[in-house]
Image (cartoon, rainbow, N blue to C red):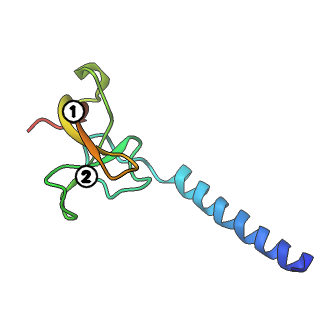
Amino acid sequence: MTTKVKLIIAGGVVLLLGVGVWNKLTTPPIPIGSPCEGLGSCPGECLAIGDFKPDDPKICTQECTSDQDCPAPTTCAKVTRLTIDGSGGGDFEDVGYCLAPQ
């Protein structure tokens, strides 16, 4: 590979990284408790609520231990979370998440 090709590739990588950083800095985060779409749209975690179906709604949330950890109007609610390990096995655990009152 010639030096010119290496420089073009490096410039492309820098440009893509710059666009990603610019987008992250200029896009306001989705508030905790609001619907979200996935990667990068939420300052916490974009959590699917439902029965593990692809069309289950997703809510922007964060882990919590009490209501004081959550911005109003959300409160800390216990959610049963499925964690899957590398071998394909999994385990359920109760975790607190900031969710809007139902």
Question: In this rendering, would 21 be left or right of 5?
Answer: left
Instruction: Report the front residue among 27 and 14.
Output: 14
Name the quadrant of the C terminus: top left
Q: Is residue 58 left or right of residue 24?
A: left
- Specify the quadrant of the image occupied by residue 97: top left
The disc placed on residue 74 is 1
Residue 79, position in %: x, y?
18, 36
3D distance between C-alphas at marks 1 and 2:
13 Å
Q: Quadrant of the N terminus?
A: bottom right
Picture layout, residue 95 above or below residue 82: above
Q: Amino acid at mark 2?
A: Pro
Query: Observer-nearest residue: 1 or 66?
Result: 1
Residue on which the image places disc 2: 35
Of callouts 1 and 2, the N-terminal one: 2
Q: Quadrant of residue 57?
A: bottom left
- At mark 2, the secondary structure is loop
The percent position of residue 19, horizontal first and vertical second, equals 61, 63
Q: Is residue 82 above or below residue 67?
A: below
**Residue at 14% over, 52% down:** 50
Seen from the viewer's position, the closer of residues 96 and 68 is 96
**Mark 2 burial class by Cα count in 10 Å: few <14, some 14-19, many 20+:** some
Where residue 26 appears, as percent x and y from the top left, is 53, 53
The residue most toward the left is: 102
Q: Residue at x 22, y 64 (%)?
A: 54
Question: Is 2 displayed left or right of 50 in the figure?
Answer: right
Q: Residue at x 90, y 80 (%)?
A: 2
Q: Amino acid at mark 1?
A: Thr
Label 1 secondary element: loop
Q: Is residue 92 above or below residue 72?
A: below
What residue appears at the point 77 percent right and 73 percent down from the top-left corner? 9
Most foreground residue, 97 or 19: 97
* Residue 21 drawn above or below residue 11: above
